[in-house]
Image: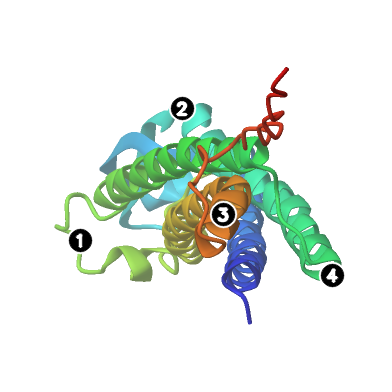
Amino acid sequence: MELNRRLLLAHCAAHGLSVAAGLLVVVPMALNGSAFKGRCALFSSGYWRTESRAELTGQPGELSHLVVRKWGPPEACQFATFVGIFTVLYGAAQGWRCLFYLHGRHDDTLFSSFLTVLMSVCVLFLSGGASVILSLGFSSWCDTVTDDNTRPYSCAESQSVPLYLDVNTSTFFTDLSLAQASLWCVTALWLAQSVLAFLRLYHSHNQDMTGPCLHRDKELLLGRSPSDCGSASPPHPPATPSVLV
């Protein structure tokens, strides 16, 4: 198998995996947004307060419940969702192009390969930033839920503990942890796609440079003086013998 076909096949596999990873970002974030009624749990701040149980449940006694002072900015959740959606759409489109090139036995032009490298590097930085934001925001929410790890349960166990909020918190850890892991996988796949795109650009550049040099190699084999690579100089017309008068 030729090198360019191997690169195309690897790029197709990377695009297919990025589509799956992007879906594993979008779906959990959408489920979490629906459970939290459109509010973003990332970077939310709050505290625990002990009140009479009769005010909340109508039963005697006291209980502790979480009070959210301020919900996180919606842009934090929307940014991660945007990166996941873009990865799914771009991966599907580029995967189809790679399959088309594999079937047609050709590759992108040099300019198109350069644009692919540029796009991959830009989205790599975007996905990396979204991964850091999601991880930091999720950690901040876990600190709020566990009261800075002073509660007798972990963040994973807190989704089964009643927090007495007006949102459904029964699956928040499952949704956000899955989205977090998937988004880091998306970042790793964008890194792989950037490397593969650069290798395809390098291979296309070598092919463009090799083509004009074939004439020079032919001249070397024939024992002639080689001409410049890229533009072969036209042969000189034969000298006309002088006629003696």
Q: Please, what is the three-letter code of the amino acid marked with disc 1?
A: Arg
Disc 2 from disc 4: Cα separation: 46 Å
Quadrant holding the N terminus: bottom right
Quadrant holding the C terminus: top right
Q: Secondary structure at mark 1?
A: loop
Which of labels 4 and 1 is toward the front? 4
Question: CB under 8 Å between callouts 4 and 1?
Answer: no
Q: Is residue 167 above or below residue 175?
A: above
Which of labels 2 and 4 is toward the front? 4
Question: CB under 8 Å between callouts 1 and 2?
Answer: no
In primary-sequence order, the first of circles 4 and 1 is: 4
Q: Which mark is residue 151?
A: 1
Residue at image mark 4: 103
Q: Which mark is residue 219?
A: 3
Label 4 neighbourhood size at 10 Å, few (<14), some (14-19), many (20+)? few
In primary-sequence order, the first of circles 2 and 4 is: 2
Question: CB under 8 Å between callouts 2 and 4?
Answer: no
Disc 4 from disc 3: Cα separation: 35 Å
Q: Does residue 92 appear left or right of residue 41 in this picture? A: right
Q: Please, what is the three-letter code of the amino acid marked with disc 4?
A: His
Q: Is residue 91 visible?
A: yes
Q: Secondary structure at mark 2?
A: loop
Label 3 neighbourhood size at 10 Å, few (<14), some (14-19), many (20+)? few
Frontmost residue, 215 versus 131: 215
Disc 4 from disc 1: Cα separation: 59 Å
In primary-sequence order, the first of circles 3 and 1 is: 1
Residue at image mark 2: 73
Residue 124 position, x and y percent, is: 45, 44
Which of labels 3 and 1 is toward the front? 3
Frontmost residue, 244 versus 128: 244
